[in-house]
Image: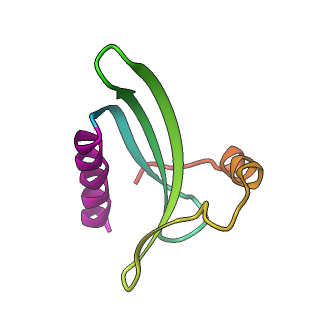
């Protein structure tokens, strides 16, 4: 699983380079209760002299399906509440 998490980090880094976004911080933490589910915390900077932003994602990994974003199927409010209750742990 550590290898998959490393690949996922690289995916975000490569995506950032492609979109002219530099990632100042990228953490992948484990959900303490839901198996194969990871909390991805990204701090990024858009463009030169641009804006700093933060984003929290929650993704699950299933070998047959790859990475899935848990937010799909949830409203922004439900997702925010879900993330608010989350106490991630180091992998």
Question: x, y percentage for residue 23?
Answer: 32, 34
**40 over 42 or under it: above or below:** below
Give the magenta part as a residue range.
1-19
Quarter of the view holding residue 24: top left
Which residue: 57% across, 59% down?
Answer: 32
The residue positioned farthest toward the top in the image shown: 49
**Any magenta on residue 9?**
yes
Question: x, y percentage for residue 47?
Answer: 31, 24
- Overall secondary structure of the magenta stretch? helix
Depth order, front residue of 50/74: 50
Which residue: 71% across, 50% down?
Answer: 76
Depth order, front residue of 57/27: 57
Pick the quarter of the image with the N terminus: bottom left
**Any magenta on residue 64?**
no
**63 over 53 or under it: above or below:** below
Query: How is the structure coloured here?
Result: rainbow
In the visual, does 35 lie left or right of 15?
A: right
Question: x, y percentage for residue 71?
Answer: 61, 60
Depth order, front residue of 15/79: 15
In the visual, does 6 lie left or right of 80?
A: left
Q: How many marks?
A: 0
Question: x, y percentage for residue 80?
Answer: 70, 46
Quarter of the view holding residue 16: top left
Pick the quarter of the image with the C terminus: bottom left
Which residue: 33% across, 13% down?
Answer: 49
**8 over 34 or under it: above or below:** above
Which residue: 23% across, 44% down?
Answer: 18
**64 over 35 or under it: above or below:** below
């Amino acid at each position: 699983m550590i290898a998959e998490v490393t690949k996922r980090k690289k995916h975000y880094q490569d995506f950032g380079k492609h979109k002219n976004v530099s990632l100042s911080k990228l953490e992948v933490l484990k959900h303490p209760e839901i198996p194969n589910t990871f909390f991805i915390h990204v701090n990024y900077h858009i463009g030169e002299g641009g804006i700093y932003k933060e984003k929290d994602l929650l993704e699950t990994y299933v070998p047959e399906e790859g990475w899935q974003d848990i937010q799909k199927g949830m409203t922004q409010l439900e997702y925010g509440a879900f993330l608010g209750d989350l106490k991630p742990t180091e992998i």
